[in-house]
Structures are given as C-alpha cells and as structure tokens.
C-alpha cells in the first residue's frame, strides 16, 4: 500500500468538513483531550476542518492527572476553547452508591471502565449544551484488539481515526504540525497506570505490521493478537436487534 500522510490528512479533513455539513452545519466539534496521540490528532484535524473557533476541548482528570500538562500544551498549541471538568466527585459518588446498594465493591474491570464512561457522559453534556457533535478518538490498532471501553471512549458521533493504525496516526499528526512531544508520547491507558504496550503484551509497531501486512514472526504474539481481536469483535458491531417483517411505510431517508 502506498502511504501518503499528507494526502491522508487532507482526505480526513475533507471528510470531517463534509460530515459536519450533512450532520450538523454550524455545530462545534467536542473533543475529549487526554494528552495522548489520538485526541491530539483528532483535535488538530477538526481545527483544520472547521476552524479553531468551532472546536471545544474537554480535559477530564479523575482527581490528579500526572500528565495533564500534555493536554494543556495541546489546547494552547491549537488555540481552542477548553474546559477542565474533573470527574473525581462523580466517580466517588458512583463508587459509594454501588457499595451502599449492593453491600460489595465493583469488580476491577468495572472500576477501570467507569472513568471512560463518565467521561463520555461529560462529553455529551457539553455537546448538548454547546451545540456540538462528539468526536470518537479510537484508532484501528486499539479497536483491533478491543482496547477501548464500550459506551466509553468507543462512543461518539463521528470517528476520524477508526481506519488508521497507530503509526499512521503519528504520521498524520506530523502533517498537522502537532508538537513532537505529543506524537512520541508513550501511550498510557489512564486507567491502571501501565503503558498500553505493557497491558497488551506486544508493541503497536508489531500490531500495526500484522494488521497491514499480515506478518508477525512471533507465533505466541500472533495468537495473542488474534485471541484479543476475535474475542472483542462484539464491540465493533452494531447492537444485535430482533428483526420482524412488519411493514414500515414512513419515509426512512
């Protein structure tokens, strides 16, 4: 595959502009800013497509966030309006209420995923209060192995990066003139304190090569990627719905 990062960036910008014309002319793009590569890339692409005055960044620490300076660097670099909305109290209230109702504690997985789901709730709160559409910031590599939270960071109204690997996202970021420190920032999930690659057990470079070329010399890693991919496909598919052959005569498009 011939890869032209500049052309890809231009195509995404045109796609975002067209999507907003059809699905929210005059609306703002609401982007959750984590300080990581994906939210940085999406925010930069939206600024180029819509203008800085139509992009709103939402910083959502859960208490103290050790790398929030990266989020602040990004919004300052892009010159976009932004808000800091700390989810600590909401998270604590959910935790306490769950314990009060059940007499027990949330599972470890529920505890990790609660933050992303509260953040998505926050983004839609801002979207409906600021004439906005919510950007999904997931990329192909993360989606491929289920490295996202259903109804959390996996949600949104439009998704510029869903078909781009991590290496491709980084190339597009450079075309958008995003600061190099953000391009090469070590990806951390923000949930358990480990890097993405520590959690996954393989590097994004290895995963991206397998996705694009079908090549992974390490059979154990290849099996691990395949197991994650097929075990998490449900996250990428539309919700299954019972079908019934009753007539629908109203206009549908």
Image (cartoon, rainbow, N blue to C red):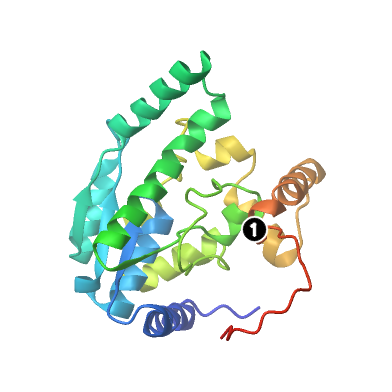
At a point 58% along the width and 51% down the height, the residue shown is 204
Q: Quadrant of residue 141?
A: bottom right
Q: Is residue 105 above or below residue 69?
A: above
Which quadrant does the C terminus fall into? bottom right
Q: Is residue 20 above or below residue 72?
A: below
Q: Is residue 152 left or right of residue 52?
A: right
**Which residue, as the protein is rendered here, is positioned at the far top?**
103
User: In x, y percent, where is residue 143?
Assistant: 60, 55
User: In x, y percent, where is residue 229?
Assistant: 72, 51
At a point 71% along the width and 60% down the height, the residue shown is 241
Of residues 31 and 107, the one drawn nearer to the viewer in this rendering: 107
User: In x, y percent, where is residue 124?
Assistant: 36, 56
- Work out whether residue 34 can be spotted: no
Q: Is residue 215 left or right of residue 95?
A: right
Crowding at label 1, few (<14), some or many (≥20) Cα neighbours within 10 Å?
Answer: few
User: In x, y percent, where is residue 4?
Assistant: 52, 80
Q: Is residue 152 above or below residue 245?
A: above
Of residues 153 and 130, the one drawn nearer to the viewer in this rendering: 130
At a point 30% along the width and 44% down the height, the residue shown is 60
Label 1: which secondary element: loop
Which residue bears the numbered disc 1?
236
Which quadrant does the N terminus fall into? bottom right
At a point 46% along the width and 36% down the height, the residue shown is 114
- Work out whether residue 229 can be spotted: yes
């Amino acid at each position: 595959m011939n890869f032209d990062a500049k052309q890809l960036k231009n195509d995404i910008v045109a796609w975002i502009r067209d999507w907003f014309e059809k699905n929210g002319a005059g609306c703002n793009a609401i982007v959750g800013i984590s300080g990581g590569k994906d939210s940085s890339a999406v925010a930069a692409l939206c600024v180029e497509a819509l203008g800085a005055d139509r992009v709103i960044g939402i910083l959502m620490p859960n208490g103290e966030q050790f790398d929030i300076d990266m989020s602040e660097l990004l919004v300052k670099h892009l010159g976009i309006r932004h808000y800091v909305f700390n989810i600590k109290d909401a998270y604590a209230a959910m935790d306490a209420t769950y314990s009060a109702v059940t007499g027990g504690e949330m599972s470890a997985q529920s505890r990790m995923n609660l933050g992303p789901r509260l953040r998505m709730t926050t983004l839609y709160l801002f979207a409906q209060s600021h004439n906005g559409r919510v950007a999904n910031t997931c990329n192909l590599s993360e989606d491929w192995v289920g490295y996202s939270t259903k109804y959390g960071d996996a949600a949104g109204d439009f998704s510029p990066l869903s078909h781009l690997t991590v290496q491709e996202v980084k190339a597009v970021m450079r075309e958008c003139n995003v600061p190099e420190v953000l391009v090469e920032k070590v990806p951390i999930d923000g949930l358990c304190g480990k890097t993405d690659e520590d959690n996954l057990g393989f590097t994004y470079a290895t995963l991206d090569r397998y996705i694009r070329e079908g090549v992974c010399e390490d059979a154990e890693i290849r099996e691990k990627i395949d197991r994650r991919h097929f075990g998490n496909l449900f996250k990428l598919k539309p919700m299954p719905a019972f079908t019934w052959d009753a007539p629908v005569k109203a206009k549908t498009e």
